[in-house]
Image (cartoon, rainbow, N blue to C red):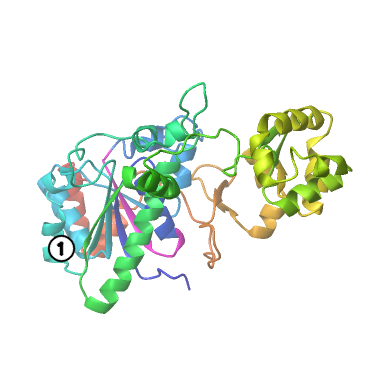
Amino acid sequence: MLPLAGIRVLDFTHAIAGPTATQMFQQLGAEVIKVEPPEKGDDFRHYTEHAGLPGMSVPFASANFGKRSVTLNLKSFSGLKVARDLAAKADVVVENYRPGVIARLGLGYDKVSADNPRLIMLSLSGFGQQGPWRDWGAYDHIAQAVSGMAIMNGTEAGPFKIGIPVVDCFTGYLGVIAVLAALRERDLSGQGKAIDVAMLDAALKIMGTAASVWSYTGQAPKGTGNRGFRLVATAEYYACADGWIALGANHQHQIEAMFAVWGRFDMLVDPRFATHAARVENYAALKGWLTEYLLTRKAADLEAELTGAGVPAARLREIGETLSEPHMAARGLVQEALLPGREQPLGVLGPGFAVDRPSELPKVPVLGADTDAVLTELGYSEQAIAALRAEQAI
């Protein structure tokens, strides 16, 4: 049995952060009902990398498989009533509108919790539900910019954003942790609660060590590019004869093992490189030597000999190459979901830790495919559902 079996999540989210959170709930066994606007649905359905089906972009599919899709016009009286009925039967509501929007729609926590005191509402936003910046809009790269992440990730050439939506994703996962804690609290108290998670807070949480350094010293840590945090040339990325290698020789025993496996015992007795302090002071000289030497070697050979000697090292790979490795098959992280209208299943990632898998492959929801079934389960008759459709409430 999956750990969240029997938990119902009502999903008023779009794009990445919110769907990432509700996707994790789904993978842990919760029933997730995704509420989308009629006709168009979640904007993420129409994103760039497309699966060749209307309203079924690959990014959308990867963050929403296994959910049920219900279309509701929340600006109509009847559509709002259906949403309130759904919330009355839910354990968790997740929304990532701008602060204040969910309340203006008539679905604020004060309203829905009056009908369902055990309800937990998770609100995800760029800058939080309170504070001078609450009304600012945000995307992942905006949060990276404001938090200092982009500058810390930069080089002399300027700031660089991280190439994946790391803040969006971590915001979603932080929301999951908060909801799991609230569910445990509800087990003890019987009461739900409202939870406020902001992208900026999540970005700064990722940067917790840097925040503490600034707090204690008054100096913000500078970006180190591809150098590791110990600032030695032996923990960095280097071009090889046929690719790139990441070295991770930070500690004395790792340094000694690395030079020994290369037969360069002379480097161990060179006073410029004999100690950590000397290696930091003579960074440029050691980097120059490594740059010249590693260009003569193949990355795969280096990876094999260094890891065999207990030195952290890895050849740089693209994601597809890594996901095709036997190691990933052994880990069981790569799973599959069904794309309606396609025979080829979609490769998706599991939750990242061991849980039971469902007996059937989850499906990516077609927009509104589950509206009638969900309303029937709520007690709506065929005539009532037909009337809602005639009103364009669903």
Residue 360 is left or right of residue 240, and the answer is left
Residue 321 is left or right of residue 222, and the answer is right
Residue 43, x across and y down, in percent = 34, 35
Which residue is rendered at x = 83% and y = 33% of the image? 297
Residue 81, x across and y down, in percent = 13, 54
User: Is the residue 378 above or below the residue 210 in the image?
Assistant: below
Residue 362, x across and y down, in percent = 49, 56
Q: In the structure shown, which secondary structural element does the residue marked by tag 1 occupy?
A: helix
Residue type of the residue flagged with mark 1? Ser
User: Is the residue 176 above or below the residue 132 in the image?
Assistant: below
* Viewer-nearest residue: 318 or 260: 260
User: Is the residue 344 above or below the residue 87 in the image?
Assistant: above
User: Is the residue 232 above or below the residue 172 in the image?
Assistant: above
Residue 146, x across and y down, in percent = 33, 34
* Viewer-nearest residue: 48 or 117: 117
Residue ranking furthest to the top: 157
Which residue is rendered at x = 46% and y = 36% of the image? 57
The count of marks equals 1
- Whether residue 22 is visible to the viewer of this picture, yes or no, is no
- Whether residue 284 is visible to the viewer of this picture, yes or no, is yes
Residue 31 among magenta residues: yes
Residue 306 among magenta residues: no
Crowd around label 1: few <14 · some 14–19 · many ≥20 (10 Å):
many
Residue ranking furthest to the bottom: 188
Which residue is rendered at x = 75% and y = 47% of the image? 255
Judging by the rendered image, the residue that carries numbered circle 1 is: 113
Residue ranking furthest to the front: 271
Magenta residues, as a range? 27-38
Residue 235, by quadrant, is top right
